[in-house]
Structures are given as C-alpha cells and as structure tokens.
Amino acid sequence: MKTKLISQKGWLAAPALAIAAACVLFAQPVLAQTRAALVQSIDEPGRNPYQELQASITCRGRKECSLQFAPIPAGKRLVLTHINGYVDVTNGSLPDVYIGAGYNTIPPILVTATSARLVFTGVRGPTSSQSGTRIFINHRVQAYFVSGEIPGAHFGVPIFDDSVSGVVQLMLTGYFVNVP
C-alpha cells in the first residue's frame, strides 16, 4: 500500500511542477514593469547646435582676406562638421581657403602658430561683369576648437594678377560638446 501512495503523490507532483514552470515562463518580471528613464548622450550632435555666418566686403582689391568667428565659450568644445560659402575673384583663379584658430582680420595673419589649419578649395561658379567669378566652397569636415579659441578663415588668391573682387562669405556649422 505504501508504494501505491508514493506513486499517487508522484503523479500529483508532475502537474504542479508543470504549472509552476508555466507561471515562471509567462509571467512578466517585476523589473520590466517599471519604465526606463530617457537618457541623452552629452556628445549627441543635436544637443547644442552651432552655426555662424561671417561676411566681408572690405577685401575688394586685396589678395588675402580673413574672417573671424566668435570665441568658443568656457566649458565647451566646438565640433565643426561643415563649411560653406563663396568668394568673388577678379579673374577666376581658385583661392586657397584655410580654417583654423587664431586668425585676426586686419592684417590677415595667423596669430598663433600652434593651431592646425585645414585647407580647402572651391568650385568656379558663374562669372558676372560686376563681381568677377564666384568661387563656391562646400565641404564636410571634422575639426575641433576648444574653449577660448577663436575660429577663423583665411582666403588667399595665389595667382599674381588676380584678387578678391566682391563679397567673401563663409558659414561654419557643427555642435558644442560640454567639457567636464
């Protein structure tokens, strides 16, 4: 008789184990029921966007011209991602365009020799009788400026008989990153 009772108890234990296993498999964990907080990376490009445009008409007749942008705020680093703009030149030669830190505007010289320079070229656009040939500049970049640096651009017309004949305009685009 004892054997018969043990087998009956064993027979009842199997469905109980199956029900317990099903509960474990299909029940939602308690932690999954709480909502996660939204998190945003401090390095995310859209967090602190940057865009600045500078233009000059005072460079007419000169072979060189510089533009100066606003200093980088304290506690920030600028990640420069794109430059675009144009320069009008008399005879259509492609100017050298430098982006860096430490350019002053008059005279156009590099103030700090330790800063890196990015060199860009342009594409010839239409020619008009009033402003010469418009050279378009449009480049993706990845450059960094630290707190306190002053981004600047320098345009140099390398051909002897050519010069800036109209407007010089450049836009810098990127985003700021908080520096700890």
Image: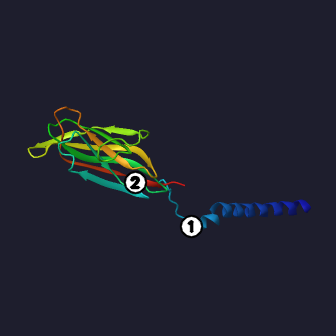
Q: In this picture, is 66 found above or below 22?
A: above
1 or 2: tag closer to the N-terminus? 1
Q: Position of residue 16 (x, y in %)?
A: 74, 64
Marks 1/2 in contact by CB < 8 Å: the verdict is no
> Which image quarter: residue 113?
top left
Q: Tell me: residue 42, above or below residue 111.
A: below
Q: Which residue is mark 2?
A: 71
User: What amino acid is found at the position of numbered circle 2 in the picture?
Assistant: Pro
Q: Position of residue 44 (x, y in %)?
A: 46, 54
Q: Position of residue 158 (x, y in %)?
A: 23, 33
Q: Position of residue 64 (x, y in %)?
A: 25, 40
x 23%, y 43%: residue: 136
The answer to whether one can see residue 44 in this image is no
Task: Say which of marks 1 and 2 sits in front.
Answer: 2
Q: In the current view of this chain or complex, which residue is farthest to the top? A: 160
180, 149: nearer the viewer: 149
Residue 127 marker: none
SS of the residue at dot 1? Answer: loop
Residue 16 horizontal side relative to residue 145, left or right: right
